[in-house]
Amino acid sequence: MTEEKSLNFIEEIVESDLASGKYKNIVTRFPPEPNGYLHIGHAKSITLNFSLAKKYGGYTNLRFDDTNPVTEDIEYVDSIKDDIRWLGFEWKQELYASDYFDQLFQFALKLIKEGYAYVDDSTSEEIATMKGTPTQPGVNSPFRSRSVEENISLFTQMKDGKFKDGEKVLRAKIDMSHTNMLMRDPVIYRIKHAHHHRTGNQWCIYPMYDFAHGQSDSIENITHSICTLEFVPHRELYDWLIQKLEIFPSHQYEFARLNMTYTVMSKRKLLQLVNEKIVAGWDDPRMSTISGFRRRGYTPESIHLFCEKIGVARRENLIDIGLLEFCLREHLNKIALRKMVVLDPVKLIITNYPEGQSETLTSEDLHGENSPIRNIPFSRELWIEQEDFLEEPDKKWFRLAPGKMVRLKSAYIIQCDKVEKDNTGKVTEIHCSYIPNSKSGNDQSGLHVKGTIHWVSVQHAIDIEVRLYDRLFTIEDPANAEGDFKDYINPNSLKVKTAKAEPSLANSHIDDRYQFIRKGYFCLDSDAKPQSPVFNLSVSLKDTFAKKK
Ligand code: ATP
Ligand code: MG
């Protein structure tokens, strides 16, 4: 039996609601505004909403919160659906708040008829001034006492396009001295002569967030409407509107949003990075978007593990991005195919290996049992990493140096005899001899060498482009730092190199995951062409997170 995990606070609420019979069926929704690509914070919300409904036998709707015509786009709708599916979740219904515009208009009329809403001609500045402050009550608008008939007539004219943007708004009539500022007659409809990506020019009035979100929840019989903490003050209005409209009693619950070090996580900021070409697009592998992580080589499993580890709480915090990287390593260590790639090559010649000869060595592709075996060609001339050779090493050096022995991974033990240099003193060739009876798997040499280095055969190597990524920001919390968050962009977040790779990498597939041994985890990039492979560094091998803890 697996260990029973303790419930998070939302699961506790759901279990008590089911036990008391308050709801028979759990229905949740994920409500993105289609004004950008989803980021890793959304993954937390998606995982929470979908897993919760699934655990309790209910379902989850995908509802596009598309009540703001100006910033929304079909490209975003498609990318959002892609990302959710990639994470492994399937929604019950695909819905759009804009499908409820008629219904929402009727709801507004109902409020007007019952004396709970009025048309206000004040400008937005006047409304703001009349609102008061948290310590001072607001004052009633001169238009607050309009008759129901006049309000119906004006609201209908607003809908019919009789007024310009900003000329009038519809406000809920609650209490201008309420302690919660959001309850001081909030605006619930505004005029906006704008084309909407789904309803076209049919509407020129659009509901505000607070008059769309809860109402949409209610229309869909959402039982637990889960959102982030900044909506706590909205809950009172959410409840008030549902109560006055006498519609399905959805309830709102708030949890702490995900904040992560070295990352910005607001679509507005991510859009700036895209528009100002600081990154190559929404799916740039340095972005905190789900599509960026996917292109970088993240797996859905690694993101699930991350969401499980961060849990669901009601207090804001800043999660170490090292935890996400740790979760990726956990998964890639199990699935990544081991390959040999030399990033900074220097030539090594095995002088006692016959010219023109080559042989095929074998190596395990995966870590652990039952690994597939791959062939690796070996010959007289090899590429090794420059950093694996030192001319004047200290005592602790176990890699290659004049007179020293190392094992070539999956191949032979070699000894360094001499080096050739160019006229700047740079080592251009390392001359070695190999021990013929020291072959890996059948070593009869009796020699013990401490160091093992990787290599590729010069004659068989393929050139690949590798993109080495570092953090996009130089400080932990760029979003909350002084000045503009773009002041903290790391100018060295991308390094591009041409590397020498073993030939089996020529047949890479975009879904394959690799460990370039001793170098890091890599995956094929979407920029790759059949004759010019491009690989992204997904994450380094070293775990900086565990060490810090
Ligand atoms: P952003 O501020 O990044 O633009 P948003 O909240 O405006 O995000 P929406 O599309 O409105 O984005 O969000 C869809 C859902 O995802 C909402 O329920 C929202 O609360 C949730 N969400 C957004 N950001 C995070 C985050 N960082 N952590 C957890 N949930 C989040
Ligand atoms: Mg939003």
Image (tube, rainbow, N blue to C red):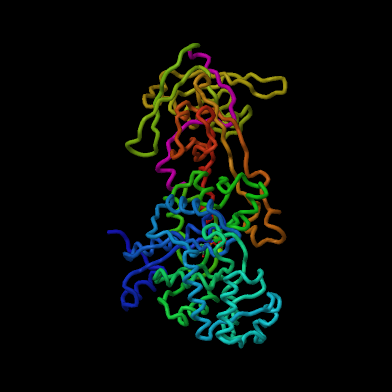
Q: Nearer the viewer, residue 189 or 63?
A: 189
Above or below, 9 against 348 in this view is below
Which one is nearer the viewer's eye here, 190 or 8? 190
Residue in view at x 67 percent, y 50 percent: 489
The answer to whether residue 8 is seen in the rendering is yes
Is residue 414 found inside the magenta-colored segment of the image? no
Looking at the picture, does residue 393 appear above or below residue 208? above
Q: Which of the image's four quarters has the N terminus?
A: bottom left
Side of 25 relative to 85 (left or right): left
Residue 418 horizontal side relative to residue 240, left or right: right
Residue 301 percent coordinates (x, y): 42, 50
In the rendered image, residue 193, in percent from the top left (x then y), is placed at 62, 64
**Residue 547, visible in the rendered structure:** no
Residue at x 46%, y 38% (from the top left corner): 510
Instruction: Say if the magenta span includes residue 343.
Output: yes
Residue 430: which quarter of the image?
A: top right
Chain part drawn in magenta: 329-353
Front-most of 485 and 147?
147
